[in-house]
Image (tube, rainbow, N blue to C red):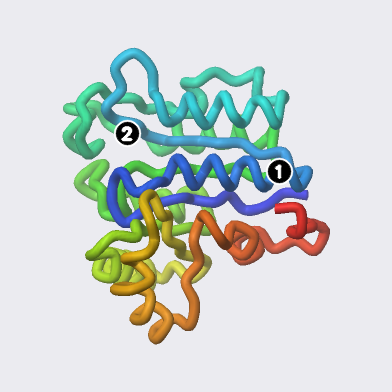
Amino acid sequence: MKFKPLFITATNTNVGKTHTTLKLLEALSLQGLKVGVMKPIETGVEDIAHDANLLFETAKRYNPALEVLKLKDIVPYQFTLPAAPYVAKGKKKINLELLETAYAKIEELCDIVLIEGAGGLLVPIEDDLYMYDFIRLFNARTLLVGHGELGCINDVLLSLHLLDALGVDDYEWCINFKESRDNFDKITLPFFISLFGRVLSVQDNLDEIIKSLVPCRDIDMDVL
């Protein structure tokens, strides 16, 4: 059974996209799904694309069919400068057909592909291309990951308003707690509960996140 891909984005860089993608990869694999991974663009690459390589090596352990691919298939565009792709790529042009071809190679070997973005939704790639454009390019459901520190209310709401303004309605959002959540519960949780009624986190609610984004009656979430 094939599922729509998941595009994992965040409210900014260093929020936990790779960590979240790994957790989703492991959980979905344990449910018997053949999972693939893709990171269309990675910047700050010197010897190796660290995030994409971590995803790729982990995915191959669960889905050996991916062994026929190379890291370049997983991360077609790699740039040395740790900056937005618009800057890091210099004069190079991002070819969307190349990205679509790379995705098709991965998708053929999988039930579902997890696509990790770079930075946040408004990270520029070309004059007329932003990270959020990958949602439509890959026809993906979207998971927005927010941090749990002071300021996350503003960061999460800005990204959610952007998704709504873009007409993206097939999405979920969650918080990734990199540190203690005590401050979050005290200074942020009350507002989110008032506005949304609940807050999902990578640490506590991975099963609910997956149920929201990968609807499938055959998946037994009790083992997560």
Given residues 17 and 139, the one toward you in this image is: 17
Q: Position of residue 72 (x, y in %)?
A: 47, 21
Q: Residue at x 35, y 31 (%)?
A: 42
Q: Is residue 138 above or below residue 154?
A: above
Report the amino acid beneath label 1: Asp
Secondary structure beneath label 1: loop
Measured along the vertical axis of the image, is residue 4 above or below residue 151? above
Looking at the picture, how far across and down is residue 152, in whole percent? 29, 64
Disc 1 crowd, CA 10 A, few/some/many (<14, 14-19, 20+):
some
Q: Mark 1 near mark 2, Cβ–Cβ under 8 Å?
A: no
For residue 196, say whether it is visible: yes
Instruction: Name the disc covering residue 11, or none.
Output: none
Amino acid carrying mark 2 in the image:
Ile
Residue found 72% across the figure and 25% down from its top: 65
Closer to the chain start, of discs 1 and 2, is 2
Residue beneath disc 1: 111
Q: Marks 1 and 2: which is nearer the front? A: 1
Q: CA distance from mark 1 to mark 2?
A: 27 Å
Image position of 78 with respect to 114: above or below = above
Q: Residue at x 48, y 83 (%)?
A: 197
Between residues 4 and 95, which one lies in front from this camera angle? 4
Q: Residues within 10 Å of mark 2 (few under 14, many from 20)?
A: some
Residue 133 shows in the view: no
Residue with the mark numbered 2: 94
Q: Mark 2 falls on what kind of element?
A: loop
Q: Quadrant of residue 82?
A: top left
